Structure formats: structure tokens, C-alpha cells
Image (tube, grey):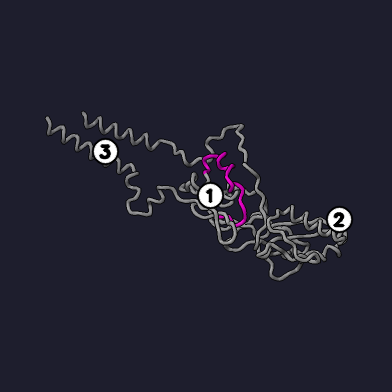
Amino acid sequence: MKKHILGALSGLALVLASCSTPKDITYFPELSTGSIVQAERQLLIRVKPEDKLSIMVNTQDPALSSLFNLIQVQNRLSGTTSSTNTVGTASSNSSGQTSYYTVDSAGDINFPVLGKLHIAGMTREEIADYIAGQLVGRDLVKDPIVTVEFANTGISIIGEVASPGRYEFNRDRLTIVDAIAMAGDLKINGKRENILVMRDLGGGRQEAYRVNLLDAQQLASSPVYYLQQDDIIYVEPNDKTKRETTPNGNTPFTPAFWMSLASFGITIATLVLTLTR
């Protein structure tokens, strides 16, 4: 009788354990209807050396506009390669060809007529205002409309995501959630509470951050909630996947193992009871 009771209890424990709901799968479980999540600050992308930019100047006189625009170059940046995904498209001229300005190591570009301009650390709007101000201030154009777009602002997403790779984008305020969606979401075995983001600081230096997709407010308060160009996102595998890299690594976590262990315990208990009678 005792043997049957022990067996029933062991089976019940295994059933209850298998029916439990994992707590590390669902994104933002603490949020309910009406919850408000506040980002610490809205981080805009700022230009740095080696960035490529599309800068178009438009005026009421097309001939005058052409003086300030680079067009019809042969070696233009390709939007997509076999290993690169593009989100959005940069602006182009009417012929579909666009030349890009490359920011040099000093943070400068060589702009037609205006010459060398220092734009490192500026946002798109700041660059557009700066160039427009230079054109007006030098009495070159009275009513310029300057449009600035990113051409090679990309991030790398690796690890336990559906589609790892490098993703190009040309927009401000791209969040880490947007980036994960671009990569097809995390795999079921991706570790959601400890995602690594590496941020390029220049000069060969990178700063590491850890973010938790299970806590919405903590995520929104992170400096890497809004991504910058050349950020690297790494989603590490969960413990179960890590154990699979070793022989029998997950054996102690399978129902069969515990059934065998329970059976062995029952056998020992029965033997002890038999010998002590």
C-alpha cells in the first residue's frame, strides 16, 4: 500500500511541475490596460566619423539647386546586400541616383560651394538647419530646403533570434523592441531577461549594457532603449539550450529522469521496510 501511495504522489508532483507556466517567456508581464511606460529620454542619432549621409538642397531655381547636390555617381551605396537588410529608404533625386557624403575622421564633410563643414555630433535636423543657415548667410540661396537622410546607419542582431544579421535603417528613435521585431522576434529559447547591447564609443571602444524584456519600465529607462548606429544586440540562449551543448546535459530536467529516480527511491524504501519488519 505504501508503495502505491508513494508512486501516486511522485506522479502527481511530476504532472503539476509539467503544467506550470514559465515566467520568463512573456514580454512585459507587469503591464495591464492603461499602464503607461515612460522612456527616460528620446535619443536621436548623431553623426559620427564614417557615417554616410544623403543631403539634398532644393530651391525655386532647379539650376541653382544642382550646384549644391551630388548626382549621377557610379559608385553609390547599395541599399541591400545578401547579408544586409534595409528598413526604409534614403531619399534620391529624380533619376533614382544619389551620391552620399562620407563623414571623415575629423567629423567633416566637403560640401559643394560651402567647402568643409564640421557636422560630427549633430542630428539630421541640426545638419539641415546648419547648411541652410550657411547658404542663406553667404547670400547663396534665399529659400533653401535642405533634406538630410541616413545612408548607412545599421545595427547587428545576433544570437537567438529568427533572422540574425545586420539591419540598416534611416530613422530616429529606433527602439530595441523595433530591432527585435525586424529580426523576426526572439526564438523560444532566447533569454529575454538578460539581452546584451554593445555600443560603439569610437576609438575602438565599446560599452556593454544589459536589458530585460520582462520589465517594461526598466527597459524604457535604459540608455540603449533607443538604438544608435553600429549597436550590436546579442540574445544569449537560455540555460536549457546551453546544457544541450554537453552530453546528457538536460537529462536531470526530463520527466523520465525523475520517474526513474522516483522508482528507484520507492524500490529502496520498499526494501528498507521489508528488511525492518
- Quadrant where the image shows the C terminus: top left
Hey, which quadrant is residue 121 in on the image? bottom right
Q: Residue 143 carries which label?
A: 2
The residue at which mark 3 appears reads as: 262
Marks 2/3 in contact by CB < 8 Å: the verdict is: no
Q: Residue at x 21, y 29 (%)?
A: 2
> Please, what is the three-letter code of the amino acid marked with disc 2?
Asp
Mark 1 closeness class: few <14, some 14–19, many ≥20 residues within 10 Å: some
As helix, strand or loop, the secondary structure at mark 3 comes to helix
Q: Which residue is drawn at 53% across and 46% down?
A: 211
Magenta segment's dominant SS is loop
Q: Nearer the viewer, mark 2 or mark 3?
A: 2
Marks 2 and 3, how far apart at CA = 83 Å
Marks 1/3 in contact by CB < 8 Å: the verdict is: no
Along the line of sight, which residue is nearer the eye, 69 or 267? 69
Q: Which residue is drawn at 67% across and 65% down?
A: 104
Q: Is residue 128 left or right of residue 33?
A: right
Q: Indicate the position of residue 218 as horizontal and vertical percent values.
A: 55, 40
- Queried whether the magenta region covers residue 217, the answer comes back as yes
Please report whichever mark, 1 or 2, sits nearer to the chain's N-terminal start. 2
Above or below: residue 76 compared with residue 29: below
Bounds of the magenta segment: 212-232
> Please, what is the three-letter code of the amino acid marked with disc 3?
Ala
As helix, strand or loop, the secondary structure at mark 2 comes to loop
Q: Which of marks 1 and 3 is in front?
A: 1
Q: Indicate the position of residue 199 as horizontal and vertical percent values.
A: 57, 54
The residue at which mark 1 appears reads as: 209
Mark 2 closeness class: few <14, some 14–19, many ≥20 residues within 10 Å: few
Q: How many labels does the image show?
A: 3
Along the line of sight, which residue is nearer the eye, 208 or 203? 203
> Please, what is the three-letter code of the amino acid marked with disc 1?
Tyr
Please report whichever mark, 1 or 3, sits nearer to the chain's N-terminal start. 1
